[in-house]
Image (cartoon, rainbow, N blue to C red):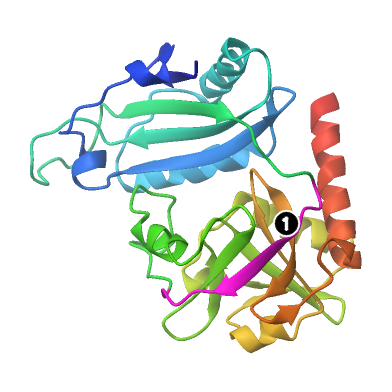
Amino acid sequence: MTYCFFNGIYMPSEEMRISPFDHGFLYGVGFFETFRTYEGKVFLFKAHMDRLREALLEYRIEMPYTDEAILEAVGKLDHLSGGTDGYFRLNVSAGVHDIGLSPSEYKEPNVILFRKELSVAPRGTEKEAVFLQTPRNLPESGVRRKSHNFLNNVRGRLELPSLKEKEGIFLTKEGYVAEGVTSNVFWMKDGELFTPSIDTGILPGTTRAYMIQLANEIGIAVHEGCFDKKEVENADEAFVSNAVQEIVPLRKIGDRLFPGASGVYYENLHGLYSEAVENMKEG
């Protein structure tokens, strides 16, 4: 049995119900974060919550729970599931209102913390990637939020047989490399790290930001900008990142082969990432 935290109540997931008048359902007014636990702890948790709260503030959705309360719920859900680590999605939906866009603020959201069993490939497991035909759409505001409006990602995913072994990479309508269906994109060229700029309309990933921090700390020059796909295809190494899968080495993009898990820079960066996770677990 799987459990969820729904507006302060722990319950079996199959018993949870929300109204069809929730504006998260009617109009996509809602935001979420996904993360995993490591021996009960969440890596970069503050960064996840800061990103979520910025989105909620912009769209005038109140958040009735503190970060500490959410962390407590994470621990409780892991406990209810046998004490094992889990995959989590924290969802804040606008709440119930009449049909129409009359509310100027949302004071009673539905807050749901979902948990499912963690099924993550071992570190170093490689993926292939392809450039998608579906273009990356523009964000609804100045910065892309992790919102219920996920149709562009769904449309891109439909081009792939599975996300387990393959990632799809969006291009903007101008032809610039953007991001993966569920990840941010990085590549190395001549000892320097490259990643698309936030200006391309990508999600400002928490793991993306930490990757840039790690590179800066060890003296790797980082370039954020607008790059076409040829620059990726001519790279020395390539990898993608997200909070659940960490850093995933790419062995192939289209017909172009890469070192994958044997890449020197991938090994270095993922090694530092893993070390930071271990330090968090011990702290």
Query: What is the magenta segment's predominant secondary structure?
Result: loop
Q: Is residue 75 above or below residue 110?
A: above
Q: Could you say which quadrant of the image residue 137 lies in? A: bottom left
Estimate the x, y position of residue 131 in percent, counting from the top left.
55, 76
Residue 129 falls left or right of residue 274 = left
Residue 53, by quadrant, is: top left
274 vs 159, nearest the viewer: 159
For residue 178: magenta? Answer: no
Closer-to-camera residue (269/61): 269
Q: Is residue 283 visible?
A: no
**Residue under pointer 1:** 248
Q: Which residues are magenta?
A: 123-135
The quarter in which the C terminus is drawn is: top right
Residue plotted at (67% across, 14% down): 83
Task: Determine the residue positioned at 8% across, 45% down.
Answer: 100
Amino acid type for the residue under numbered disc 1: Val
Position of residue 26 in the picture relative to residue 60 (left or right): left
State the SS at label 1.
strand
